[in-house]
Amino acid sequence: MNTNRHGSHESRDPHNSHDPHGSSAPQQITLRGPAELADALPFMLGFHPSDSVVLVALHGERGRFGGRVRVGIPGSPREWPATAEYLAACLVEGAGRRGGDRPDAIVVFLCQEPRPGETAQRVMERLRPFAQRLRTACGALDIPVPEALCISDGLYFSYCCPDARCCPPDGTPLALSGTSVMAASAAYAGIQVRGTLKDMEARLKPRTEDDAAQRAALNEAATVIVPRILDTPASGLGRRETRETTLGLARRLLTRFAAAPGGPAPRPHAGGTALPPALKASLTGPATGDERDDALLSPDEAATLILGLQDRDTRDQAAEWMEGPEAAPALRLWRAVSRRCVPPYQEYAAAPLTLAGWVAWSTGDEPSARVALGLALEADPEYLFARLLHQACNEGLDPEALRACLRQERDTRLAAEAPGAPAPAEAAPTEVRTRQRARQTARRAARQAGLRTTQAARRRRAEPRPPRRPVVRRTRRTGRARSGA
């Protein structure tokens, strides 16, 4: 094997996450050759990337791992040149925004399973032009690509190594699961690989698109909730009633989810309810995990949350369940709600998916956060909250700045609602000013953390466009009721 091409590489802190409780210095792992590079990829991302192209930055003489970017492999080869240029530029610019050094080299991974009747070697050959485009795009930025690997059907192939003794053209089997130095080090550090990307996305998507009961519940709820969001100002009675109804239901569901196996109990809420007898009975059967959580949520309850969360103020208050004993049941709840966004309400999933991504990021699970936020942007590419969180998560920023802002806004609101506080009519100007100051704090914190938005995005945030009424029709996109991003 060419030692100049396949030298050793150092891996530090595979998930690049922030530990809110503090941690010791990250462990260093030395990887030698394409076999260990291929084995390390799931540990760097936190999941097995299926149908993905991944670029990983290398720094210094020893090839220390740095930032990484991942996107799905475009289905059309005509999109490969633009995708290659975008990924290379994104990786380099991301390092600059974080204040880091420019990458000294980049490693490329192409991961795709064979199609029916196709072999892994054929996958490698089919993707070879894409690998070459990626190497050319990096070279145009004066950054070499010492290794480009294709991983398919349990084999890896090198696009760079010409030595058939170490990188045969028919592929080399990947190491057995759990037997590599990276796997041993990850197990010691408590790092977990969460399955494949498809598995993680499946936890956030409807199990079936032919859910007539859920679709009927959404249609019925839309006739009541959407006019209230559309036709009244944020301080109007209709919007306020919708907000109170949605958040009240969410609090009761948090208590219900926490009472079910697998979740710690949240702080007591006024009006909290115990687990209904029918749902208790359903939990004694074979349903586990996500199926168990699906059994905790009725179609009508899911519809109320999906429609109510289209209101930005409602969503912002729901984002406050981000830490402590409330975080785990909140994450399960938002995942379950996302799975109920059946056609033609797919775009409505942006709100619960963003909340799921936010809670995952806030609790240190960056791989799950990236997947949820990526799906939120697929549902609505213009959803500003998801765009900001996705950018911040990908750049390795600390979520504490946003947590602090949400805590401040929650404390201010609870103080205004305390006994002896001014009546709502008298307190309205103060409440508006407080909310404005809190949002200014959030924007200032975002700017300090390196989050930049376009002028158009700022205008959308300052003057949110009115939501559209949902129309059930046979088109890919539907109008959505929401008040801003």
Image: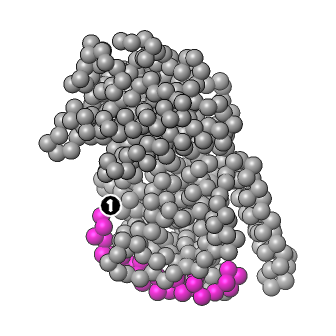
- The colour mode here is one colour
Depth check: give the residue in front, 474 or 20: 474
- Does residue 308 appear left or right of residue 440 in this picture? left
Q: Residue at x 43, y 11 (%)?
A: 3
Q: Amino acid at mark 1?
A: Arg
Asked whether 451 falls inside the magenta stretch, the response is: no
Q: Residue at x 63, y 65 (%)?
A: 457
| Residue 355 screen position, x and y as percent | 55, 59
Rate crowding at label 1 as few (under 14), some (14 to 19) or many (20 or more) other CA atoms within 10 Å.
few
Q: Quadrant of the N terminus?
A: top left
| Residue 28 screen position, x and y as percent | 56, 20
Write down the residue under mark 1. Answer: 207
Looking at the rendering, which quadrant does residue 254 occupy? bottom right
Please say if 132 is above or below 376.
above
SS category of the residue bearing label 1: loop
Q: Quadrant of the C terminus?
A: bottom right
Please say if 79 is above or below 124.
below
Please say if 394 is above or below 168.
below
Q: Is residue 217 visible?
A: yes
| Residue 259 screen position, x and y as percent | 51, 57
Q: Which residues are magenta?
A: 208-236
Please say if 368 is above or below 384.
above
Looking at the rendering, which quadrant does residue 174 occupy? top left
Question: Is most of the magenta stretch helix, strand or loop?
Answer: helix
Depth check: give the residue in front, 471 or 110: 110
Residue extending farthest to the left is: 117
| Residue 448 screen position, x and y as percent | 75, 49
- Does residue 263 appear left or right of residue 47 in this picture? right
Q: Residue at x 64, y 70 (%)?
A: 460
